[in-house]
Image (cartoon, rainbow, N blue to C red):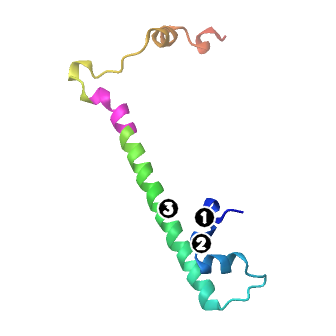
Amino acid sequence: MNTRVSYADAVYPDELDEEFDTFPMSQSVDLVRMRSDQLTSLAGSIQNVVGYVAIQGEQVLAVIAGIYVLRHPRFQHKLLAAPLSFLHWLLARTDSML
């Protein structure tokens, strides 16, 4: 196995120790607490990034959906496409009921 291709030479000894730890754990409680804190901070960072991406997506959608507000007041009504306008003016099913 080539260790350069798999990046096995770049792994920290703590990570290898964690991978090959037995069950139940043979490490001290402080070391496990440190690993848990690292995972918690990593999860918090990922959650922040996902939140920022969601905010940017909402802002893009707001700009796209809100373009009709930027029009002149005379043209701010929603413009319907021809097929949708045709279906809009068809009779409703409630009109055909007895």
Depth check: give the residue in front, 24 or 71. 24
At label 3, the amino acid type is: Ile
Cα gap from disc 2 to disc 3, whole angstroms: 21 Å
- Residue 62: quarter of image: top left
Cα gap from disc 1 to disc 2, whole angstroms: 7 Å
Q: Read off the residue under disc 1.
A: 7
Q: Horizontal placement of 66 versus 96: left or right? A: left
Q: Secondary structure at mark 1?
A: loop
Specify start and end residues of the magenta stretch as a single range. Answer: 61-69
* Residue 67 location (% of width, % of height): 31, 29
The structure residue drawn at horizontal position 22% and vertical position 18%, both measured from the top left corner, is 74
Q: Are marks 1 and 2 in contact (CB under 8 Å)?
A: yes
**Which residue is the site of mark 2?**
11
Between tags 2 and 3, which lies in front?
2
- Name the residue carrying label 3: 46
Percent position of residue 98, x then y = 67, 10
Q: Secondary structure at mark 3?
A: helix
Which amino acid, by three-letter code, is at mark 2? Val
